[in-house]
Image (tube, rainbow, N blue to C red):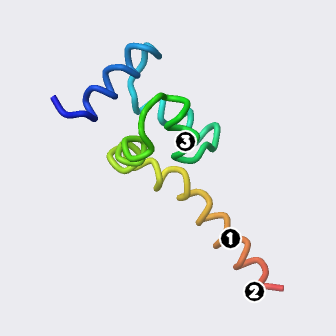
Amino acid sequence: MTEYDSYREKIERRHDKALVEVMKDLYIKDNLGPSVGAKQLGMPRQAFVHFVQEYGLKQLKFGDYKKKVMILSKRQMAR
């Protein structure tokens, strides 16, 4: 068992749901960064970043942002 697996199990037991759901709530819904999110979960920042990358949460969080920026820039160019 890797160190990451032990963090996963610990957090899933504590929150009674899958780690990916806990991470989505903190990283996307609550808009917390890796340092604050890791502190709330009781894990190192490196582990938090690992799970963000493993679950592809960065793309989920910033995918909509990129679309909004593109739409806004197109509107400004149309003016």
The answer to which quarter of the image holds residue 17 is: top left
- Residue 73: x and y in percent read 71, 78
Q: Is residue 75 above or below residue 32?
A: below
**Residue type (three-letter) at the residue carrying disc 1:** Ile
Circle 1 residue: 71
Q: Position of residue 50 (x, y in %)?
A: 35, 46
Mark seen at residue 77: 2
Sequence-wise, the earlier of marks 1 and 3 is 3
Residue 1 shown left or right of residue 49 in the figure: left
Between the C-alphas of marks 2 and 3, the distance is: 32 Å
Q: Please state if 35 lies on the left or on the right of 31 as rendered.
A: left
Q: Quadrant of the N terminus?
A: top left
Amino acid under label 3? Tyr
Q: What secondary structure is marked by label 2?
A: helix
Q: Is residue 70 above or below residue 65?
A: below
The mark that comes first in sequence, 2 or 3, is 3
Label 1: state its secondary structure. Answer: helix
Q: Which residue is mark 3?
A: 27
User: Mark 2 belongs to which amino acid?
Assistant: Met
Tell me where residue 49 appears, x and y as whole percent: 41, 48
Using the rendered view, name the quadrant where residue 75 is placed.
Answer: bottom right
Could you say whether the residue bearing mark 3 is in a helix, strand or loop? helix
User: What is the C-alpha distance between the residues marked 1 and 3?
Assistant: 24 Å
Q: Residue at x 38, y 20 (%)?
A: 12
